[in-house]
Image (cartoon, helix red, strand yellow):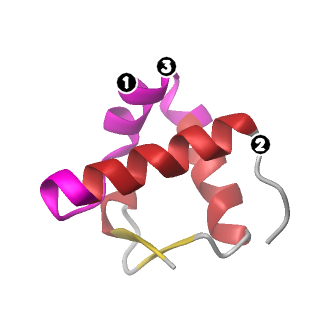
Amino acid sequence: MDHLTERQEAVLACIREWIAETGEGPTVREIGQRVGLSSPSSVAYRLLRLEERGVIARSGRRWRSCRLT
């Protein structure tokens, strides 16, 4: 896997922690609150980049269905 940006690492860490705490993926807004991104579209952009790299995957259209690969 190529090097992730600092922000991508923060988003990935947030997803890992959230899944460990709750058993499901966080919403875009929940990720934004934890990593300091106020725009849902900014969070979604980073999630798409992580999905393209194969770091995360989702089973449905919503990001809450994301899982670590």
Local packing at callout 2 (Cα closer than 10 Å; few below 14, some 14-19, many 20+) is: few
Mark 1 element type: helix
The disc at residue 33 is 1
Amino acid on which the number 1 mark rests in the picture: Gln
Taking the image as shown, residue 45 lies to the left or right of residue 19, namely: right
CA gap, disc 1 and disc 2: 19 Å
Of labels 3 and 2, the one closer to you: 2
Give percent across and percent down for residue 18. 28, 49
Q: Is the magenta stretch mostly helix, strand or loop?
A: helix
Mark 3 element type: loop
Mark 2 element type: loop
Q: Hey, which residue is sitting farthest left in the picture?
A: 22
Residue at the spot of label 2: 5
Give percent across and percent down for residue 54. 66, 76
The residue depicted at 61 percent of the width and 70 percent of the height is: 55
The disc at residue 36 is 3
Q: Is residue 14 above or below residue 32?
A: below
What range of the chain is rendered magenta? 20-42
Local packing at callout 3 (Cα closer than 10 Å; few below 14, some 14-19, many 20+) is: few
The residue depicted at 40 percent of the width and 42 percent of the height is: 28
Closer to the chain start, of discs 1 and 2, is 2
Amino acid on which the number 3 mark rests in the picture: Gly
- Residue 10 in magenta stretch: no
Are circles 1 and 3 on residues that touch, CB within 8 Å? Answer: no
Amino acid on which the number 2 mark rests in the picture: Thr
